[in-house]
């Protein structure tokens, strides 16, 4: 009961703090002309305020201050430095742009603060693919790779209105449930707080009058917190999994299913860029959300809603399978699902030049069809008028 009251207070406080301060950020950004200028890859056509993620940072710092003490191993003290490093990195990237290498170095330093805390140490894979205890150095490599992958994957999906918010809300809702069930209330409260931030931000992000982007400042922060929650989930002791509705050894696959949208999109985009002999971080419009908008004709809201629903359904499916199926069978199922998704989107492998040509061709075909249909309609109208007059 006490946790419920605290969670409600954290949610309301985080929501109001974000909701009430974002308009102030918009005014400052507009006054200082720190707007995001659209380019040939942009999904927006007008200058738009950015730096919405600034509100995430100070909200999370406030929450960490008030809930500090619920962390049994001082996790808050280790989270704040990493959070601050990525906040400063994202802020600089939004204002003057930094190189991918510099951004990666900042991520490694931020992640290092988390890895040295014993609370996040993964001691065993609990029988996943018959792997049990792992040495500490292997944990550092695996955990570091997991966190950096999640941070960059979430950063890359922030390409259209509402998508990063919707996907983040789905992921954080699931982690809130998991950590509440396992009694890890500190991490449940962090999930609740960031979820409230995203809900408050979402209304501005999809607005036509008071629009703002979270920018790299926001996406790096959210990706970092999600990576921390994922690592903590994998580091839970076997006793903590008793109340969860899936087998202990299936935990890594459940984590992948929770993050399926950013992970799949990043893997697909990187594969296409490398195949096109480009750098994995070179910009283009090959993301899944771009496919839904450019080829399937969906709006930003529709694409975000569909992707968010897919993420939720995929997680539920894997939790149901994870309650009974052995992890080898689930691995085969996961690989099959990824192959099917990759095949569906394979024909949308394009660079910007090809995309532009296809869009122009599609518009010309539409114009030709309309020009052919209009004379027919006019003729039919004239014939009907003659019949009436006769």
Image (cartoon, rainbow, N blue to C red):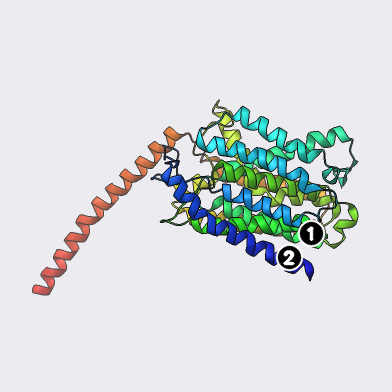
Which SS class for mark 1?
helix
Q: Quadrant of residue 220?
A: top right
Q: In the image as oriented, which residue stretches furthest toward the left?
A: 390
Q: Which dot marks residue 185?
A: 1
Percent x, y for residue 101? Answer: 62, 27
- Asked whether disc 1 touches disc 2, contact meaning CB atoms under 8 Å apart, the reply is yes
Residue in the image at 24% along x and 51% along y: 372
Q: CA distance from mark 1 to mark 2?
A: 10 Å
- Is residue 47 visible in the rendered image? The answer is yes
Percent x, y for residue 32? Answer: 43, 42
Q: Which dot marks residue 97?
A: none
Q: Is residue 133 above or below residue 9?
A: above
**Residue toward you, 195 or 33:** 33
Percent x, y for residue 99? Answer: 57, 28
For label 2, the crowd category at 10 Å Cα-Cα, with few meaning under 14, some 14 to 19 and many 20 or more, is some
What residue does disc 2 label? 6
Residue in the image at 72% along x and 33% along y: 109
**Residue toward you, 74 or 152:** 74
For label 1, the crowd category at 10 Å Cα-Cα, with few meaning under 14, some 14 to 19 and many 20 or more, is many
Percent x, y for residue 374? Answer: 22, 56
- Is residue 265 visible in the rendered image? The answer is no
**Residue toward you, 368 or 6:** 6
Q: Is residue 196 above or below residue 216?
A: below
Earlier-in-chain disc, 1 versus 2: 2
Q: Where the C terminus falls, by quadrant?
A: bottom left
Q: Is residue 349 left or right of residue 88?
A: left
**Residue toward you, 270 or 122:** 122
Residue in the image at 56% along x and 39% along y: 91
Which SS class for mark 2?
helix
């Amino acid at each position: 009961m006490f946790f419920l009251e605290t969670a409600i207070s954290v949610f309301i406080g985080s929501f109001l703090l974000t909701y009430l301060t974002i308009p102030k950020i918009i005014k400052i950004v507009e006054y200082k002309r720190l707007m995001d200028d659209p380019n040939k890859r942009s999904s927006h056509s007008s200058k738009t305020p950015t730096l919405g993620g600034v509100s995430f940072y100070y909200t999370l710092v406030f929450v960490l201050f008030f809930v500090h003490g619920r962390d049994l191993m001082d996790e808050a003290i280790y989270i704040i430095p990493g959070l601050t490093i990525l906040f400063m990195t994202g802020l600089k990237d939004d204002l003057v742009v930094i190189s991918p290498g510099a951004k990666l170095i900042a991520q490694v330093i931020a992640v290092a603060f988390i890895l040295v805390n014993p609370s996040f140490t993964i001691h065993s894979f609990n029988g996943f693919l018959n792997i049990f205890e792992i040495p500490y150095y292997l944990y550092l490599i695996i955990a570091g790779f997991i966190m950096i992958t999640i941070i960059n994957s979430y950063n890359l999906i922030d390409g259209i209105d509402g998508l990063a918010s919707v996907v983040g809300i789905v992921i954080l809702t699931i982690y809130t449930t998991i950590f509440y069930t396992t009694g890890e209330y500190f991490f449940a409260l962090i999930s609740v707080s960031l979820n409230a931030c995203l809900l408050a931000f979402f209304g501005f992000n999809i607005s036509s009058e008071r629009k703002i982007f979270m920018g790299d400042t926001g996406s790096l922060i959210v990706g970092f917190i999600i990576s921390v929650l994922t690592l903590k989930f994998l580091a839970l002791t076997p006793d903590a999994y008793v109340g969860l509705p899936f087998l202990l050894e299936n935990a890594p696959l459940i984590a992948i299913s929770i993050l399926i949208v950013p992970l799949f999109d990043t893997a697909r985009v990187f594969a296409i860029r490398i195949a096109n002999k480009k750098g994995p971080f070179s910009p283009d419009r090959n993301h899944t959300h771009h496919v839904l908008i450019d080829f399937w004709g969906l709006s930003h809201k529709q694409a975000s809603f569909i992707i968010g629903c897919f993420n939720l359904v995929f997680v539920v499916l894997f939790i149901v399978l994870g309650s009974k199926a052995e992890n080898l069978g689930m691995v085969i199922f996961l690989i099959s699902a990824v192959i099917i998704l990759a095949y569906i989107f394979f024909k949308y492998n394009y660079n910007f030049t090809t995309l532009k040509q296809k869009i122009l061709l599609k518009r010309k075909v539409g114009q030709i069809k309309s020009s052919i249909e209009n004379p027919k309609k006019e003729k039919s109208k004239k014939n009907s008028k003659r019949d009436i007059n006769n």
